Image (cartoon, rainbow, N blue to C red):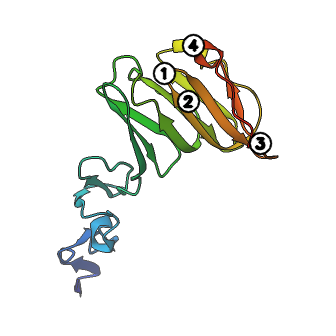
Amino acid sequence: TTCDATSGSVVCGACPSGYSGTGESGCEPLPCLSNPCQHGAVCTDIPGPPADYQCACPPGINGKDCDIVFTDIEGAFSGTCGLRSDGKVACWNTPDLGTDPPVGTFQSITTAHTADQLCGLDASGVAHCFGADYNDVKNTPSTAFSAVSVSAGGACGLPLGGGISCWNPYLGYTVPST
């Protein structure tokens, strides 16, 4: 913007397009000028002060900058759950899994395709199961696992120290020796 000094005062023009403020106070770039929205989201400037912005994220993408995406997706009997890049779990169309998935940060998830059950490993590798509680799979051990699997018949995991561990197996099945 340009300013003119006349009769002991300064008169400035408006800020150019893409900037906020007044010529007298200074012109600052609007937030959308730096394109903060990711994954093809549309950015809308919100006038200030202070100036802010809002991203219109595509379906399945979240976060202020549309930077939280799904990294894994698992189908259950009557719905689907996904693991987001921020470690949170989201489920939809799953009456038994509910709309309140487990709280915490997860590194992986797995679902029982014949039942609405989900197990996930938290950041420490400890299994957490929720949803329909066939065969009491929610009663998980405190062991750290590298992988976990769940079915309508129970749940099993691979402990970090090796081997395999199952809990609450349906009809008392046992893990075969190799």
The CA distance from mark 3 to mark 1 is: 22 Å
Q: Which mark is residue 163?
A: 3
Few, some or many residues within 10 Å of mark 2 (<14, 14–19, 20+): few
Q: Residue under label 4, please give it.
A: 135
169 or 15, which lies in front? 169
32 or 37, which lies in front? 37
The percent coordinates of residue 82 (x first, y second) are 41, 41
Check whether the beta carbons of the residues at disc 1 and disc 4 lie within 8 A of each other. yes
Q: Residue under label 1, please give it.
A: 152
The CA distance from mark 1 to mark 2 is: 23 Å
Few, some or many residues within 10 Å of mark 4 (<14, 14–19, 20+): some
Q: Quadrant of residue 169?
A: top right
Point out the image quarter for the N terminus: bottom left
Few, some or many residues within 10 Å of mark 3 (<14, 14–19, 20+): few
Give the residue type that dot 4 points to.
Asn
111 or 55, which lies in front? 111
The percent coordinates of residue 121 (x first, y second) are 62, 39
Q: Residue at x 32, y 50 (%)?
A: 61
Check whether the beta carbons of the residues at disc 2 and disc 3 lie within 8 A of each other. no
Mark 1 residue element: loop
Q: Say whether residue 76 is left or right of residue 122.
A: left
The CA distance from mark 1 to mark 4 is: 8 Å
Q: Say whether residue 163 is left or right of residue 43.
A: right
Q: Residue under label 2, please give it.
A: 103
Give the residue type that dot 3 points to.
Gly
